[in-house]
Image (cartoon, rainbow, N blue to C red):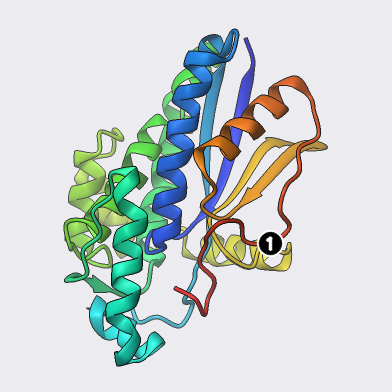
Amino acid sequence: MALIHISIASDPVCPWCYIGYRRLTQAIRLYRKTYPGGGQDTIRITWKPYILDPNASMESIPYIDRMTQKLGADKVAGAQAHVLRLGRPDGIHFRFGGRIGSTIRAHQVIMLSELHDSERFNGDAATAAAEAGAGTAALVEALFEAHFEREEDITDVDTLVRLAVQAGSGLDARSVRSWLEEGRGVEEITQEAQRARDGGIQGVPFFQFGDGDRQLTLSGGQEVAEFLQVLIAYKEGLDATTPPNMGTGGCTEISC
């Protein structure tokens, strides 16, 4: 049995991050079903913050207004149609009637959930390896779905508190609200996001398989087969061809 650690640099308002994560989870299911012994391996996902728009206001604006600002009114309809087509095969039904703003608070909640996961399983290595990270993964999925499919405002404290509790991450409403209102973790999040840029990550999603000297990377919303290939390559200790720039799709500061 092997432990495969996958670290994902992501921003909750990046549509390609949602698509890429959905495809990764499909690849993991295939790996467990089809690769010899894959069902016995533990795959742990952790999250690194990436802030596509560091200057975004903490007060949200209509998503359609932001698209118009970035793309121009004449290109919005085409961009929406393109994203809709991309999402459907992966079971994602994008909608554009919500709001968008700074993602700092959403990253705060993700950070709190990861800390909670680590503390929850501290001292029980077997359980930690098997389960730590599951609560945060459910929370991140809930953030994606709320923003992109249910048109909810994930800059709003009340919304984030509700999503954190409903995701089954084990967090309670009082601790989440306190964490957000006190601004805890913000400095660490901004520093981590800057380190990602300084380290050469120019867009998201960005996936790192493994730690230390032995790691493989993929960038962009790759196809399921690409994710599966890298999982197998990592397990077998093989070198894999990894694209240095965005793969089949991704978001940069100027493109999403």
Residue 74 locus on image (x, y percent): 31, 91
User: Residue visible at 80% across and 28% down?
Assistant: 238
Q: Nearer the viewer, residue 37 or 147?
A: 37
User: Residue visible at 67% across and 63% down?
Assistant: 195
Q: Nearer the viewer, residue 196 or 149?
A: 149
Pointer 1 residue: 245
* Res. 122 visible in picture: no
Relative height, residue 79 to residue 176 (above, below): below
Relative height, residue 86 to residue 224 (above, below): below
Circle 1 — which element? loop
* Res. 206 visible in picture: yes
Binning the other alpha carbons within 10 Å of mark 1 as few (below 14), some (14 to 19) or many (20 upward) gives some
User: Residue visible at 39% across and 38% down?
Assistant: 137
User: Residue visible at 26% across and 85% down?
Assistant: 65
Relative height, residue 64 to residue 168 (above, below): below
Number of numbered tags placed on the structure image: 1
Residue 113 locus on image (x, y percent): 39, 42
On screen, residue 56 versus residue 100, left or right, reads right
Q: Quadrant of the C terminus?
A: bottom left
Residue 192 position by quadrant: bottom right
On screen, residue 20 versus residue 103, left or right, reads right
Q: Quadrant of the N terminus?
A: top right
Residue 244 locus on image (x, y percent): 73, 58
Relative height, residue 4 to residue 178 (above, below): above
Disc 1 marks which amino acid?
Asn
Residue 112 locus on image (x, y percent): 40, 47
